[in-house]
Image: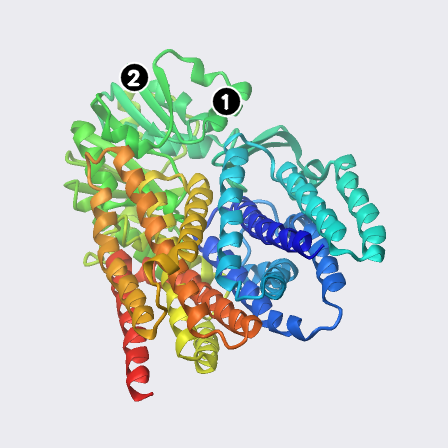
Amino acid sequence: MQIRFEHSVRISLFTLGFSSLFTQVLLLRECFTLLNGNELVIGIILANWVLLTGAGAYLGRFFGKMKVKIPFLLFLQFIFSLLPLLMILKLDLWKALSIPVGSMPGLTTIIGSTFLIQLPFCLLNGFLFIAFVHQLSELSGKNASARSYSIESVGGMVAGLVVNVLIFNAISPFACLHILLVLNLVVCILTSLSSGIRPVRFIMIPVCIVFMIVPFFTDLETQTLNNLYPGQKIISHRPTPYGNVDITMNAGQLNYYENGLLLFSSGNEIFNEEAVHFAMVQHPHADKVLLVSGGISGTVGEILKYHPVLVDYIELDPELIRTGKRYSKMLDNPVIRITEGDARRFIRTAKEKYDMALISLPEPSTLLLNRYYTLEFLKELKPVLNAGAVISIALPSTADYVSTTALKTNSILYQTLHKVFANVLILPEQKNYFLASDSPLSSEISTLTAKHGISNKFVNAFYLDENSLKDRSEYVMSQLDRNSDANTDFRPMAFFMQIRYWISMFRWNMLVYGIVILAAVLLILLSLNRISLGLFTGGFTASSVEMLILFSFQIIYGYLFLATGIVITLFMAGLAAGAWSYRKIYPVSSINNYIYIQIALALFSLGFPFIILAMNLPGIPVFFVQIVFILLTLIISFITGLMFSMASVINAKNVTTTTAFNYSADLFGSALGAIVTTIVLLPLLGLVVTCLILVAVNLFSAGFLYVRMKIA
């Protein structure tokens, strides 16, 4: 019976890792779709996740002192099975009840609410890991912390593969969670059967069977959607590999949402006319037009007034095109050529030369969107433009008031455009439209519209006052900081300014929160011993690099949804490999070898940014870039797995207590790395400086450990 129960503990550890990563990816996906797809949210979610899991692991050190261990463990395992589905339901309910449709909650609200929503699951996740380590060590008669770590990591790796297949095939999150619920309850039944405790069997098995069946008789997804869009009729809801595409109807108006963000609404003729005609009238005859996104909002109809011979329309999510075609016939014109995919990759291989490029995207509030506001993008775009071509790109309007943050964002975009094009003109109306060309540009829009013989409802002499437009344009441009930095892929200043602007709307004092975080970090550091300090540093580095890999993939490819599951899967595979093979690499566990691992992290951090920057150069084969991303993820996670296993052996006085301290130190460091890298280091300092800070942190930790070893 003891052997059977030992096997069930291993299965439970595997399932714990599987459930943890499976739930994490789905939670990130839901938060990304519900909270308007801001990468800052990913950092917050991951930081809360690992912080709470670390706290649960720290509490797990008390499990060894409990008298009734197995029944309590089975009860916690059952509760853990229910929590993933309940957590996503709580997230959706919070969004529906507290955040109006199309709006973004404040940073304090996001941090606090997601912390509370994740609290039960993550605490149990960390606690159960330590409890299973204790049970496996007790049953096998030897330290099982490294083996348990690798088993859990393998479970996470398998979960990553499974959840990526489900997401790629557009399986809804609730269907995925139903599958996970059944899996966990089956494992609960198996563990109950092997425990040898009859009362536990008689209670646990029927209860698990009931909870397996009940969710399949409820349509949770439809109920949740109705709560998320109150007062609107849901016309279409389509999960895709890139997120969710929702179309709602309200008073005859169609509203298009992508990942919870309102892209556009039907019938907004003022926006459509300004987005097209401000740029199109600048060119004597734009035969070939490049349109990046927004075509189904009505801009295509405005472009066709100029009788172009070709309109190349690029949209990343094919579901947006398919859904739009069902409710609009404007894309059926033979001159319109639709391409589904990433516009930057399309431009790199484009065979056409364009007279006009209309970038019809929201402001750079995410790294995905920031890719189209950078110096690198403009340099890629210019070779596919004819002489005298005009491009148009927009930011939120500052026609009536220019805030400090908005002024900096406008200055950054102006300077970025000016480094590539000779002339840049800002026309502030519904948005601030930035026009750029090597040919002269004019604010006399009504006059130029009349010369082209275009009939518009709003962009005409009767509605648009040219003198007023010229005055406002000159005012906005006179306020610009001409010494501002340019916006680049890996120093995304425009994105950082958008984050600052968003934070400023909610009166969020970064200094106060910074002091609180610093105080918490100091308290944690003071409680660590010399070995767990290395794990804290290693966790900080691994988490930071993981975020940098995710964001780099987003910057280069724009596929963060797909990348998140893939990167986390590879990361878990590397952890498992490092934990399994540390004895072969280091037959003798020593402080010196532990220091060498920290130095290896420093060297990896030193080379990382230069490899990533090289992958963003034109002409690098896509397959080669993907291989490099895979190798980078596996290497950093392999080193982290080695470090954890080494620490478990060096400091192994009490298996349960040591594992609890080590695991929590690793996770606390990971939490700090996720939040600091996302909010401060990458946006403000850029990729290279961020990695140099990681080098310094690891060398300091290794040096501190070396000095302590010599003193001892």
Query: Residue 78: x, y in percent?
Result: 73, 54
Q: Residues within 10 Å of mark 2 (few under 14, many from 20)?
A: some
Q: Is residue 591 left or right of residue 161?
A: left
Q: Is residue 181 left or right of residue 323?
A: right
Q: Nearer the viewer, residue 473 or 367?
A: 367
From mark 2 to mark 1, how far is it between C-alphas? 21 Å
- Residue reaching furthest to the top: 334
Residue drawn 45% across the image and 57% down it: 43
**Disc nearer the start of the sequence (2/1):** 2
Query: Residue 105: x, y in percent?
Result: 55, 56
Query: Residue 396: x, y in percent?
Result: 40, 47
- The dot on residue 150 is none
Count of marks placed on residues: 2
Q: What residue type is labelled 1?
A: Arg
Q: What residue type is labelled 2?
A: Leu
Q: Height in image: 644 above or below 267? A: below
Q: Height in image: 695 above or below 307? A: below
Asked where in the image residue 133 lies, by quadrant, the reply is bottom right
The C terminus, quarter of image = bottom left
Q: Height in image: 416 above or below 674? A: above
Residue 624 is at least partly visible in this image: yes
Q: What element carries label 2?
A: strand
**Residue corresponding to mark 1:** 322
**Residue corresponding to mark 2:** 310
Q: Is mark 1 on a helix, strand or loop?
A: helix
Q: Residues within 10 Å of mark 1 (few under 14, many from 20)?
A: few
Residue 308 is at least partly visible in this image: no
Query: Residue 62: x, y in percent?
Result: 64, 74
Q: In this view, does 246 lie to the left or right of 308?
A: right
Residue drawn 30% across the image and 57% down it: 408
Kindly indicate whether the residue at mark 1 contacts the one at mark 2 (C-beta within 8 angstroms).
Answer: no
- Of the two numbered discs 2 and 1 in the rendering, the one whose residue sits closer to the viewer: 1
